[in-house]
Amino acid sequence: MTCAIEVNHVNFRYEEFVMEDICMNLHRGEHKALIGLNGSGKTTLFKLILGLLEPLSGNILIFDRRLTRENLWEIRKDIGFLFQNPDDQLFAPTVWEDVAFGPRNLGLNEDEVAKRVEESLKFVGMEDYINRAVNQMSHGQAKRVALAGILAMQPKILLLDEAFTGLDFPMVQSIVEIISQLRREGISVLFTTHNRFFIENWADSVVAIDSGQIVFDGPTDQALCNQDVLRQMGNWDLLEKKMKETRL
Ligand SMILES: Nc1ncnc2c1ncn2[C@@H]1O[C@H](COP(=O)(O)OP(=O)(O)OP(=O)(O)O)[C@@H](O)[C@H]1O
Ligand SMILES: [Mg+2]
């Protein structure tokens, strides 16, 4: 079966931080959680998959096409990436212009661009903000707009880096609807989270990374009883018990 993403024996290093022999697959239509403690290498892996960083060795395939400097821009059209910090990806003067940027880059005509912008802003509940300057929004609003910008491009793969941190409950509810739609459309998703709720209820499978090394890759039910995975997620029951004790 063709994979959406195939990471083969990738090695990479920043000065201090080393990623060694990273192998993982994201199957077509699969929704996979990438988990790991702060600084374990999740965002770095996303940047490698997007070609923002280049591996020292090994290779990355997107729908069977090997990622190279030459085909980077072509391949990236299939991938929507939501950055951890939305300020890193909003840059046009207004919300409308920002969401229109991606579809315009795909070469769509202005009617189609307008249709996609309106639909995706409505989907994330930001249709009343079309003329707002992108630097005049709250963190959660900026995240919604960034998400709209990605959905408007109708990507085949989504990389979501802490997409739900800092979002209120109504927004998380809309996200759950977005996820159902992505499933119906067969879109493949790789998402990072520190929240057990999303791992248990959303992920088909889990890949866990610890200090630049993959320590688990498998179905969610197996992940939830694997010690290497649990170390990355933390023992919340124990923490809850301790918190209750301190209040006594
Ligand atoms: N530009 C950089 N130059 C040097 N080191 C970096 C750079 N960016 C990240 N690092 C280091 O690489 C390691 C992995 O960082 P990364 O951002 O991938 O972690 P993460 O798993 O996404 O963490 P978090 O959960 O906090 O988002 C960290 O030790 C970090 O300090
Ligand atoms: Mg990160």
Image (spheres, rainbow, N blue to C red):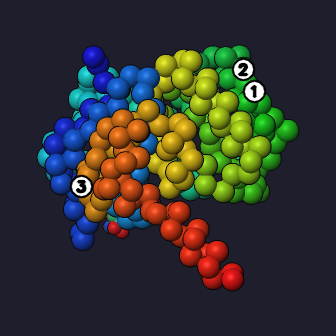
Which residue appears at 73% of the width and 25% of the height?
A: 119
Q: CA distance from mark 1 to mark 2?
A: 5 Å
Compared across the picture, whether 189 is left or right of 71 comes to right
Q: CA distance from mark 3 to mark 2?
A: 43 Å
Looking at the image, can residue 175 be seen?
A: yes
Residue bearing the label numbered 1 = 118
Looking at the image, can residue 160 be seen?
A: no
Q: Secondary structure at mark 1?
A: helix
- The quadrant of the image that shows the N terminus is top left
Dot 2, crowdedness within 10 Å: few (<14), some or many (≥20)?
few
Kindly identify the amino acid type of the residue bearing the numbered disc 2.
Answer: Lys
Residue bearing the label numbered 2 = 115
State the residue in front, 37 or 128.
Answer: 37
Mark 3, mark 2: which one is toward the viewer? 3
Q: Earlier in the sequence, mark 3 or mark 1?
A: 1
Compared across the picture, whether 174 is left or right of 158 comes to right
Kindly identify the amino acid type of the residue bearing the numbered disc 1.
Answer: Glu
- The quadrant of the image that shows the C terminus is bottom right
Image height of 116 relative to 160, above or below? above
Dot 1, crowdedness within 10 Å: few (<14), some or many (≥20)?
some
Q: CA distance from mark 3 to mark 1?
A: 42 Å
**Residue 17: % across, % down:** 26, 66
Which corner quadrant of the image does residue 75 belong to? top left
